[in-house]
């Protein structure tokens, strides 16, 4: 039989509490600055487009569109992807994608208005 009013009290040492806190922190998704720091340490300031595709789990054409749309920045004359912009995109994907969609809609509307004005 289950008693919903049952309370369990546990006494833990400081070391046990710190170990539990470390275990919980390891399971949480990285904070934005932590992701950027980790990615720069692991990949350097810039990475190949192939590495960016792998990090983001996207196809080559998708990465090209993201670069063209400005969602991800390149460096080294467009040969490499800026790792900080990659981390920023991964941390703010929904917001960046929404802004890109809105910009495309505004551009399409401007083109339609330009056609009708002629």
Image (tube, rainbow, N blue to C red):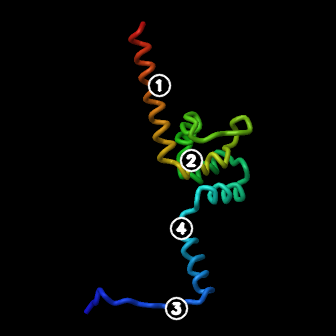
Of the image marks 4 and 2, the number of the one nearer the N terminus: 4
Question: Where does residue 1 sit, x and y in percent of width and height?
Answer: 25, 93
Which residue extends farthest top? 118
| Vertical relation: 51 (above or below) 20 | above
Quarter of the view holding residue 5? bottom left
Q: Residue at x 49, y 36 (%)?
A: 100
Question: How far, Cα to Cα, is label 4 from label 1?
Answer: 39 Å
Q: Count neighbours of disc 2 (C-alpha within 10 A) and say few if under 14, some if 14 to 19, many if 20 or more.
A: many
- 97 relative position to 5: left or right: right
Question: How far, Cα to Cα, is label 1 from label 3?
Answer: 62 Å
Question: How far, Cα to Cα, is label 2 from label 3?
Answer: 43 Å
SS under mark 2? helix
Question: How far, Cα to Cα, is label 2 from label 1?
Answer: 22 Å
Whether pointer 4 and pointer 1 mark residues with C-beta atoms closer than 8 Å, the reply is no
Whether pointer 1 and pointer 3 mark residues with C-beta atoms closer than 8 Å, the reply is no
| Vertical relation: 10 (above or below) 69 | below
SS under mark 3? loop
SS under mark 1? helix
Q: Count neighbours of disc 1 (C-alpha within 10 A) and say few if under 14, some if 14 to 19, many if 20 or more.
A: few
Task: Identify the residue under disc 4.
Answer: 28
Task: Identify the residue under disc 3.
Answer: 11
Of the image marks 2 and 3, the number of the one nearer the N terminus: 3
Question: Where does residue 61 sit, x and y in percent of width and height?
Answer: 54, 39
Residue 96 tag number: none
Please name whichever residue, 27 or 11, is drawn nearer the observer in this view of the structure. Answer: 11
Question: Where does residue 90 sit, x and y in percent of width and height?
Answer: 55, 51
Residue 107 tag number: 1
Whether pointer 2 and pointer 1 mark residues with C-beta atoms closer than 8 Å, the reply is no
Of the image marks 2 and 1, the number of the one nearer the N terminus: 2
Question: How far, Cα to Cα, is label 4 from label 3?
Answer: 24 Å
Residue 89 tag number: 2
């Amino acid at each position: 039989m289950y008693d919903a009013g049952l309370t369990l009290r546990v006494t833990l040492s400081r070391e046990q509490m710190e170990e539990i806190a470390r275990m919980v922190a390891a399971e949480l998704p990285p904070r934005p600055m932590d992701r950027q720091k980790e990615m720069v340490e692991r990949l350097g300031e810039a990475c190949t487009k192939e590495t960016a595709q792998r990090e983001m789990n996207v196809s080559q054409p998708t990465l090209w569109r993201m670069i063209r749309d400005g969602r991800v920045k390149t460096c080294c004359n467009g040969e490499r992807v800026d790792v900080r912009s990659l981390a920023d995109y991964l941390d703010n994907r929904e917001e960046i994608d929404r802004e890109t969609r809105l910009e495309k809609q505004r551009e399409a509307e401007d083109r339609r208005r330009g056609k009708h004005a002629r």
